[in-house]
Image: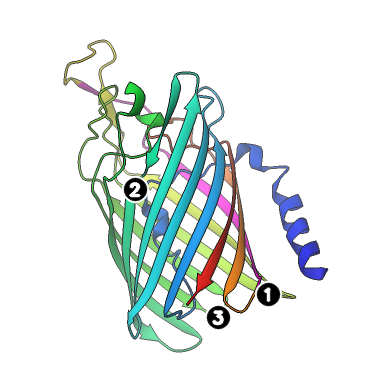
């Protein structure tokens, strides 16, 4: 009963604010988000609902499968495979999104704290021209991006920095979007309450240059213009809760609240409402 009460309490805290939540992640938020435990193998399946808010008014449904394995002492590899569906005033698009692969290597530390380096990539496996719709609706971003980062964990605290190097321009025929690189800063705290593992994180993502799109005044031509204010800074608070359903299976909940919102939505990753639920199975 205490565990159920804690879950309800956590959701009651976040639900009144989540209508403004922003969870815009082009891949860089994978940095620092890997398993804290030394699990030999784990499988995770999660569902997320999102809404972009005005003016796009797009709703999103996403399912993500993640597999992680300890390949050497202190070395872990993680693979994330998403499926995304978007529906809005211009139409609907759905399909497999961009696959993310991340390698995490612990280089210093002990049972209380450790430093790890992370390297990986987000690969353009998702479609970018479903329904002949703009990039905002597409399940994929259309670029092969490099992910680099470092994370330090000490007792209940986590600090991480990450960088996403964007690999060119999307082949989306409407916008031909080219995003700027992203810089991530992340700090988090975890604690236990009864059988719950509760976490609170602050994530700041700075796009380092303005994005560019095909000139709307010259459709069909490869003439590109920068979009003002698309080199945005966004800052989010994210709350997480995890509860053991059995010795090997855990239930996960997530909600996010913006401190600093983004206004420009070119890549379809802006959210005005975000909630997530999932499960993790350890082998």
Identify the secondary structure beneath mark 3. loop
Q: Residues within 10 Å of mark 1 (few under 14, many from 20)?
A: few
Left or right, 35 with reference to 219: right
Across and down, in percent, residue 50 comes to 55, 39
Q: Distance between the Cα atoms at labels 2 and 3?
A: 28 Å
Q: Nearer the viewer, residue 202 or 13?
A: 13
Residue at numbered disc 3: 155
The magenta stretch is 224-245
Residue at the image point whose x is 52% and y is 70% from the top: 281
The front one of 264 and 283 is: 283
Residue 133 in sight in this render: no
Q: Main secondary structure of the magenta part?
A: strand
Spatial distance from mark 1 to mark 2, Cα to Cα?
Answer: 32 Å
**Residue 57, percent across and down?**
54, 25
C-beta proximity under 8 Å, tags 1 and 3: no
- Residue ranking furthest to the top: 217
Q: Which mark is residue 182?
A: 2
- Work out whether 58 lies above or below 149: above
Q: Quick one: SS at disc 1?
A: strand
Q: Which residue is located at x 35 percent, y 30 percent?
A: 135
Q: How crowded is mark 2: few (under 14 residues within 10 Å), some or many (20 or more)?
A: many
In the image, is residue 240 part of the stretch drawn in magenta? yes
Q: Does label 2 or label 3 sit earlier along the sequence?
A: 3
Q: Residue 260 carries which label?
A: none
| Image quarter in which the N terminus is found | bottom right
Q: What residue is pinned by disc 1?
A: 192
């Amino acid at each position: 009963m205490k565990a159920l009460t804690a879950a309800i309490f956590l959701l009651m805290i976040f639900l009144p604010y989540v209508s403004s939540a922003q969870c815009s992640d082009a891949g860089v938020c994978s940095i620092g988000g890997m398993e804290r435990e030394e699990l030999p193998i784990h499988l995770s399946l999660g569902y997320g609902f999102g809404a972009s808010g005005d003016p796009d008014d797009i709703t999103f449904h996403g399912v993500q499968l993640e597999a992680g394995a300890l390949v050497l002492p202190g070395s872990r590899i993680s693979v994330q495979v998403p499926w995304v569906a978007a529906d809005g005033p211009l139409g609907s698009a759905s399909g497999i999104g961009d696959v993310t692969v991340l390698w995490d290597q612990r280089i210093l530390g002990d049972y209380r704290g450790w430093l790890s380096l992370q390297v990986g990539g987000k690969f353009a496996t998702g479609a970018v021209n479903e329904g002949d719709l703009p990039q905002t609706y597409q399940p994929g971003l259309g670029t092969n991006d490099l992910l680099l980062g470092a994370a330090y964990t000490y007792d209940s605290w986590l600090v991480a920095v990450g960088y996403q190097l964007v690999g060119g321009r999307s082949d989306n025929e409407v916008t031909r979007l080219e995003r700027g690189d992203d810089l991530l800063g992340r700090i988090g705290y975890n604690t236990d309450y009864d059988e719950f593992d509760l976490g609170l994180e602050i994530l700041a993502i700075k796009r380092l240059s303005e994005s560019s799109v095909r000139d709307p005044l010259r459709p069909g031509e490869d003439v590109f213009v920068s979009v003002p204010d698309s080199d945005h800074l966004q800052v989010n608070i994210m709350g997480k809760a995890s509860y053991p359903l059995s010795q090997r299976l855990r239930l996960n909940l997530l909600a996010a609240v913006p401190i600093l919102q983004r206004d420009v939505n070119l890549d379809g990753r802006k959210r005005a409402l975000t909630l997530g639920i999932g499960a993790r199975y350890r082998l």
